[in-house]
Image (cartoon, helix red, strand yellow):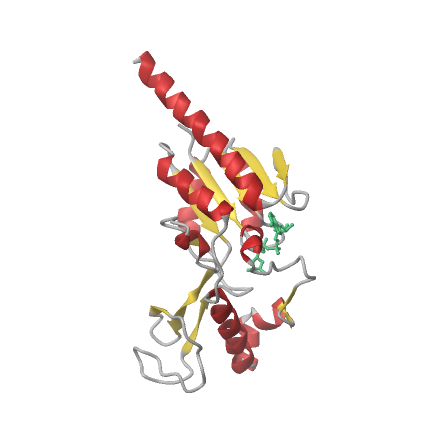
């Protein structure tokens, strides 16, 4: 049975109403991404960075729902008899709300914050203000978004590398392939003889063997529905031979 690794990007959440990073020439609610997604930006203007994430944290909780693509992935993982790994560059919680488990959020999560003194991570749904005390050190100004900024090391890289080395099929969904290290996952998978497939609205970025163009809410349920029925018939055929 194939070991499958899926990488998702902002495109899978676009139809849920969350803006992508590079479709609107890199502006996010009026901010340049690089102005608010770096440790330097946080150091020089913490209030601006906190405000940016407070807005995104609030937006995520304002009637944003998982779409058919998130749901199709969760359903596939539930029924697929082989190994399945879901990696996301997204910081929203739509995969989890669609029912996915063990989601590898390599760029962190909007609904989590971290104490810069103790490194403890907390589930967090309200704004972080200059007066907000940290739950562990009880000081103000020590909490930061649990987000991986540019120039910081992504999370789960050991798990991700191991999964890519073992995978037979690598599928990228809704990502422009502009940001490392995620942009290199397709090459890593190919070096381990995996099949590589891109499901995306724009033409694929990266050397995928197969590219399926379209809206995630349509192409993801179709693709994974076919993949599952093929796997299930393969399994029953094998059982029949035993
Ligand atoms: N269905 C499928 N694909 C879509 C849809 C859709 N409805 N809408 C947009 N897309 C595609 C776009 O064509 C684009 O190729 O999704 C991709 C989104 O690309 P980006 O905006 O660059 O987002 P992503 O690839 O996730 O960015 C990676 O960059 O800014 C950092 O940390 C941030 O995680 C982010 C990383």
Instruction: Estimate the x, y position of residue 120 in percent, counting from the top left.
Output: 33, 70
Q: In which quadrant of the rendered view does residue 105 lie?
A: bottom left
Is 185 drawn above or below residue 120 in the view shown? above
Determine whether, in the image, residue 240 is placed left or right of residue 5: left
Which residue is the extreme one toward the top? 241
Q: Residue at x 57, y 53 (%)?
A: 15
Farthest-out residue, bottom: 131
Above-or-below relation of 93 to 51: above
Residue 10 seen in this snapshot: no
Q: Is residue 235 above or below residue 69?
A: above
Q: Is residue 29 visible?
A: yes
Tell me the residue at 39%/85% (across/down): 140
The picture quadrant where one finds residue 241 is top left
Q: Position of residue 206 (x, y in %)?
A: 63, 43
Identity of the residue drawn at 45% across and 25% down: 230
Closer to us: 202 or 85: 202
| Left or right, 137 with reference to 127 | left
Relative to the observer, which residue lies in front, 160 or 204? 204
Residue 25, image x, y percentages? 70, 62
């Amino acid at each position: 049975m194939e070991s499958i690794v899926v990488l998702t990007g902002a495109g899978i959440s676009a139809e849920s109403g969350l803006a992508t990073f590079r479709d609107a020439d890199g502006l996010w609610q009026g901010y340049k991404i690089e102005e608010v997604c770096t440790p330097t930006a946080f150091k020089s203007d913490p209030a601006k960075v906190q405000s940016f994430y407070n807005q995104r944290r609030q937006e995520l909780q304002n009637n944003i729902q998982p779409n058919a693509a998130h749901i199709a992935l969760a359903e596939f993982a539930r029924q697929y008899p082989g190994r399945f790994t879901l990696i996301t560059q997204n910081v929203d919680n739509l995969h989890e709300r669609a029912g996915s488990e063990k989601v590898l959020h390599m760029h962190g999560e909007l609904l989590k914050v971290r104490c810069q003194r103790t490194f403890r991570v907390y589930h967090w749904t309200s704004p972080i203000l200059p007066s907000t005390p940290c739950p562990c050190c009880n000081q103000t100004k020590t909490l930061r978004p649990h987000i991986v900024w540019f120039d910081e090391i992504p999370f789960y890289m050991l798990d991700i590398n191991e999964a890519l080395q073992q995978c037979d099929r690598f599928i990228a969904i809704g990502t422009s392939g502009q940001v490392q290290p995620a942009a290199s996952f397709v090459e890593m998978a190919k070096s381990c003889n995996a099949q590589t497939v891109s499901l995306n609205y724009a033409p694929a970025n990266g050397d995928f063997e197969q590219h399926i163009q379209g809206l995630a809410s349509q192409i993801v349920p179709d693709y994974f529905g076919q993949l599952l029925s093929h796997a299930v018939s393969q399994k029953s055929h094998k059982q029949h031979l035993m």
